[in-house]
C-alpha cells in the first residue's frame, strides 16, 4: 500500500489523542481553579 496514507493516518491518530488529553487536562485544571 501507499506509505503516505499510513503516515497520514498515524499522524491523525496522534493529533486526536493529543487533543483529547489536552482537553481533559484543561477541564480538570479549570474545574479545580474555580
Image (cartoon, grey):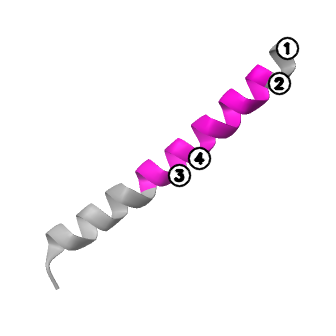
Between the residue at mark 4 and the residue at mark 3, the CA separation in whole angstroms equals: 5 Å
Give residue 20's position: percent from left, percent from top: 59, 46
Give residue 18's position: percent from left, percent from top: 51, 44
The reply to whether discs 4 and 3 touch (Cβ–Cβ < 8 Å) is yes
Between the residue at mark 3 and the residue at mark 2, the CA separation in whole angstroms equals: 21 Å
Mark 1 or mark 4: whose residue is earlier in sequence: 4
Residue at the image point whose x is 53% and y is 52% from the top: 17
Residue carrying label 1:
34
Q: Is residue 10 left or right of residue 23?
A: left
- Disc 3, SS: helix
- Magenta-drawn stretch, dominant element (helix, strand or loop): helix
Choose mark 2 or mark 4, whichever is in front: 2
Residue carrying label 2:
31
Between the residue at mark 1 and the residue at mark 3, the CA separation in whole angstroms equals: 26 Å
The range drawn in magenta is 14-30
- Disc 1, SS: loop
Between the residue at mark 2 and the residue at mark 4, the CA separation in whole angstroms equals: 17 Å
Mark 3 or mark 2: whose residue is earlier in sequence: 3
Choose mark 1 or mark 4, whichever is in front: 1
Q: Is residue 34 left or right of residue 6?
A: right
Residue carrying label 4:
20
Where 12 falls versus 22 (above or below)?
Answer: below
Mark 2 or mark 4: whose residue is earlier in sequence: 4
Amino acid at each position: 500500500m501507499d506509505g503516505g496514507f499510513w503516515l497520514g493516518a498515524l499522524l491523525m491518530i496522534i493529533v486526536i489523542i493529543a487533543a483529547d488529553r489536552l482537553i481533559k487536562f484543561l477541564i480538570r485544571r479549570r474545574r479545580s481553579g474555580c
